[in-house]
């Protein structure tokens, strides 16, 4: 019995050792993949600073991943030695994704999503809204949703008549997506609201956050407000302190991504969030909308997101467990799978 017991123990130890080695290899692969994504982010950040120093305002300054943009003009293009793309791409009618960041962020925040979508064979473009990312407009000059959304609207206007895109809007960027749906319903195949302000007709983006931040009157007395035109005049923007931003936005995000955000985020223009949207059944009402809920979100709680979905029902709802308000940082693979799944929906 004693020898048998020893023999079984060795076997079990062997199995345990094999499992441990597999887990270690899997962990190393994940770390390598994460490091590669962060290297791309560093490259993008350097590119942004170079563009800022040169005060370059061309169309490419509003896009991230410009090293690959030259080959994105046609979905049929592919490098001779490129790897085999998935078969399901043939069933996807709309391959272009336009990624719209949320308040304070910029096109830079989508670097993981861009890398993953491109590796799948899809065509992502991230846009800096006015006064965001590397767009040089001063926040105090961004007073309306139309001004804030102008880079997105310009992009959609320049699309050919038969070209369609999938819009993805994060947080307050959801209001820009709604605004675009009202203007160009025929150019937007699908709209994805990522823990976003999916407002109803006559509602303000700020109203969505009111339960988290307090009433507009209380918020107007906040220490986070920026009075760029003089303290005697109404505030023009707001910017949370680093401690508040970390707790609100990045409670599940990797430290490297938080560090990137802390040096890249810009003040948030207040005017666009206080503007009521006019959305009609004939235009906005005919759009194909999808909502992605983040279930560990401290900026826009799951309860508030559930309320948005209930009051303004989309075609489909997806949920990401363990994600903070920035799933492109905290759960990039889960977000990627959802975006690919939505692209495949007829």
Image (spheres, rainbow, N blue to C red):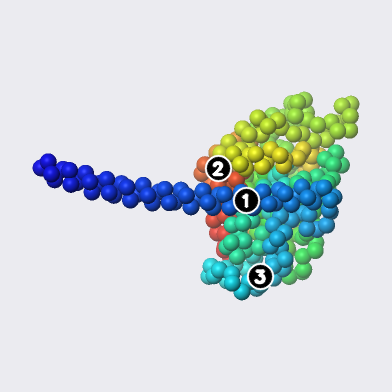
Of labels 1 and 3, the one closer to you = 1
Quarter of the picture holding the N terminus: top left
Quarter of the picture holding the C terminus: bottom right
Residue 252 position by quadrant = top right
- Work out whether mark 3 precedes mark 2 in sequence or the reverse, and give the earlier one: 3
The label shown at residue 323 is: 2
> Which residue is tagged 3?
75
Q: Position of residue 343 (x, y in %)?
A: 59, 61
Alpha-carbon span between mark 1 and mark 3: 26 Å
- Could you tell me which secondary element the residue under label 3 belongs to? loop
Residue 64 position by quadrant = bottom right
Residue toward you, 124 or 93: 124
Q: Who's the residue at 48% across and 52% down the image?
A: 29
Residue toward you, 22 or 103: 22
Alpha-carbon span between mark 1 and mark 2: 22 Å
**Mark 3 closeness class: few <14, some 14–19, many ≥20 residues within 10 Å:** few
- Work out whether mark 1 precedes mark 3 in sequence or the reverse, and give the earlier one: 1
Asked if residue 159 is positioned above or below residue 253 in the image, the reply reads below
Asked if residue 306 is positioned above or below residue 179 in the image, the reply reads above
Q: Position of residue 281 (x, y in %)?
A: 72, 55
> Which residue is tagged 1?
39
Residue toward you, 37 or 103: 37
Q: Who's the residue at 77% across and 68% down the image?
A: 160
């Amino acid at each position: 019995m004693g020898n048998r017991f020893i023999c079984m123990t060795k076997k079990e130890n062997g199995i345990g050792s094999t499992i441990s080695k597999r887990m270690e290899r899997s962990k190393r692969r994940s770390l390598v993949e994460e490091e590669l994504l962060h290297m791309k982010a560093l490259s993008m950040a350097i590119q942004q600073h170079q563009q800022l120093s040169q005060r370059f305002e061309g169309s490419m300054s509003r896009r991230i991943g410009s090293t690959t943009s030259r080959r994105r003009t046609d979905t049929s293009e592919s490098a001779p030695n490129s790897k085999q793309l998935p078969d399901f791409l043939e069933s996807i009618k709309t391959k272009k994704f336009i990624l719209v960041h949320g308040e304070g962020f910029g096109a830079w925040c989508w670097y993981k999503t861009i890398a993953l979508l491109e590796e799948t064979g899809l065509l992502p473009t991230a846009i800096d809204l006015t006064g965001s990312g590397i767009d040089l407009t001063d926040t105090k000059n961004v007073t309306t949703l139309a001004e804030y959304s102008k880079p997105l609207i310009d992009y959609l206007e320049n699309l050919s008549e038969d070209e369609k895109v999938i819009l993805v809007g994060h947080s307050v960027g959801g209001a820009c997506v709604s605004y675009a749906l009202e203007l160009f319903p025929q150019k937007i195949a699908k709209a994805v609201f990522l823990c976003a302000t999916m407002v109803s007709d006559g509602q303000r983006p700020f109203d969505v956050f009111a339960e988290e931040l307090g009433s507009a009157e209380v918020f107007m007395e906040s220490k986070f407000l920026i009075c760029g035109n003089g303290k005697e005049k109404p505030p023009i923007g707001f910017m949370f302190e680093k401690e508040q931003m970390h707790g609100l936005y990045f409670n599940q995000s990797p430290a490297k991504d938080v560090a990137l955000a802390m040096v890249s985020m810009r003040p948030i223009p207040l005017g666009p969030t206080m503007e009521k949207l006019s959305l009609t059944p004939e235009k906005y009402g005919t759009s194909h909308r999808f909502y992605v809920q983040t279930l560990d979100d401290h900026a826009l709680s799951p309860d508030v997101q559930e309320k948005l979905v209930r009051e303004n029902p989309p075609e489909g709802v997806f949920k990401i467990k363990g994600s903070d308000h920035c799933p492109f940082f905290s759960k990039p693979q889960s977000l990627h799978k959802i975006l690919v799944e939505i692209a495949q929906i007829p």
